[in-house]
Amino acid sequence: MKPFVLVLVLVSSLAAFGQARVGGIGGNTGDKRVDPGSVYDRPEELGRVAQAQQPLKPKDMQSGSFKKLQEITGLKPEQLKMMYTASGAKEYKEFATSIMAAKSLGLDIQKVLDGLKKDSLNGTLKKLGVEKDKIKPEIKKAEQEFKDTNKAG
């Protein structure tokens, strides 16, 4: 009987060790549920980070607006492509209109593109100190410039 009890104790202790905390001291408890205070429960707090950037297409790189961006920034096509990838813009049109609006407003282009990582163009311009009543007209103007350069391009 004693060997059976000893085997039973050893087997049950192994089972208990198998349920140890996954992350070690202070780590993950192994519980797969999301913390109730997590931003994943509040998608509006994820902001733009949760949205994937659309790849730059060959037609974008051959467009009139892309040539205009080269003029504005003084960058070569590959450099501009890298700038797009590093920016917070979620699509090419947003990238282009952001650069055009930044130029028109005399803002640092990189600050505007970095702002897009967390906010919309409207919100970014507001945070950079652009007067509220100037924001929408400037964005509309940049969007129109984008359309016009693509038509001409």
Image: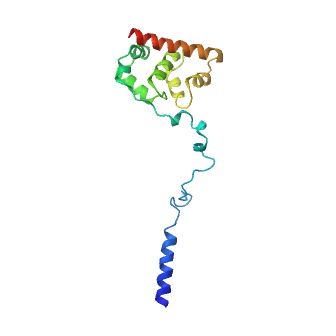
Q: Quadrant of the C terminus?
A: top left
Position above or below: 15 against 26: below
Q: Position of residue 26 (x, y in %)?
A: 57, 58
Q: Position of residue 32 (x, y in %)?
A: 54, 55
Specify whether 152 is left or right of 118.
left
Q: Does residue 103 show up? A: no
Specify whether 137 is left or right of 93.
right
Specify whether 52 is left or right of 57.
right
Position above or below: 7 against 72: below
Q: Which residue of the protein is positioned furthest toward the bottom in this rendering?
A: 1
Position above or below: 39 against 139: below
Residue at 53%, 62% (x, y): give it: 21
Q: Does residue 101 show up? A: yes
Which of the pair 105/66 is nearer the observer?
66
Query: According to the image, what is the colour scheme of the structure?
Result: rainbow
Residue at 65%, 15% (x, y): give it: 133
Q: Position of residue 108 (x, y in %)?
A: 52, 20
